[in-house]
Image (cartoon, grey):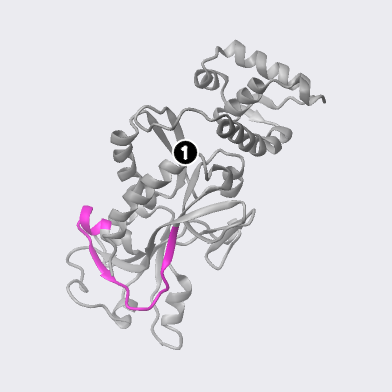
Amino acid sequence: MNPGRIDLNLLRVFDAVYEDRNLVHAGRRLHLSQSAVSHALGRLREVLGDDLFVRTAKGMEPTARAVAMAGPLRSALLQIQSTLGDEPFAPQTAERGFVIAANDYVTMLLLGRLSRRLADEGPLMDLTVRPSTRLDLAGQIDIGRIDIAIGVFAGLPERFQSMEVWRETQALTMRRGHPLEGGKIDKAELAAYPLVTVSLGGQDEGAIGGFIMERGLARQSEMFDRQALDDAYEGSALAPRIRLSVAHSLAIPALLRDTDMIALVPSPLAAEFARTDGLIASVAPFAAPQSVVMAVWHQRNTHDPAHAWLRKQIADVAQGVADSIVS
């Protein structure tokens, strides 16, 4: 392969097709016709000696060679853009799409607020939210298909950067009229009622100690501190029973409505249920360490003005969530 034969525009086409998995969508982004995108891909395939993409019912699926080159290529294109000194980033007129990975709980608390803020501050910007529970979240960040992942992570590889979004601890939520409504709940009272918890992935997905490890990134698999719960009742004849474990936290209000079950959830979620669903929020009767909800991104995006601006918006709207936390 002769690198001198590669036109920079061909690499921009590759990057767009890799992101969109669709020739028409990539063409719209680049202001090119579908035939022009197809022709550019043909030229790049000839130079690299690889198909790069295979047409399937789900769209243009990348080959192994395309997957391997996508991340470094995206990083190189951003560096070139920064070096050449594009026009200053203007949120009110910038057209940009961002992909954020988050679970349903973070989406409800944070991204609704963020969407409303962007409508005023960045009206031409679009958000796509993908589930953070998907396998190989780290790989999706590596290749540029996810701009920011928001959640609880036990460790970060050096290639990723992060910022704190908020801190949370364990809280309880239950229906109005519950026998324990109105007073401080102790451990014995909690043990008398079955629990509902949220599990985002079990041992079948490789979860160890409440986290799933992939490509150096350990992401939360359970939205409660199982170890803190076990420690609280160690040596006791009484222990709460987890009757129901669900994958979607937004199902909890419906599950609690006509029962005496109690849900063990992150403190901001308990506060939101109390505000919007008429449930009762209460402090958990055992000590649990705070968890840090973080926004995580690839280090190649740290100095991208649009990306930095989005991170600032996330930090600003997250303060409203932090102010509501049950303590």
Q: Is residue 200 above or below residue 210?
A: above
Q: Which residues are magenta?
A: 272-293
Position of 40 with respect to 194 (left or right) is right
- Amino acid type, residue under disc 1 in the picture: Pro
Q: Is residue 278 visible?
A: yes
Please tell me which residue lies in front, 156 or 109: 156
Name the residue located 37 percent from the left edge and 68 percent from the top edge. Answer: 169
- Residue at coordinates 51% horizontally, 41% vertically from top-left? 147
Per the image, the residue denoted by label 1 is 305
Residue 223: which quarter of the image? bottom left
Q: Is residue 322 above or below residue 4?
A: below
Q: Is residue 111 above or below residue 249?
A: above
Horizontal and vertical percent for residue 180? Answer: 22, 74
Q: Does residue 59 appear anywhere in the picture? A: no
Name the residue furthest right: 1
Q: Position of residue 285 (x, y in %)?
A: 32, 78
Question: Is 63 included in the stretch rendered in magenta?
Answer: no
Viewport quadrant of the N terminus: top right
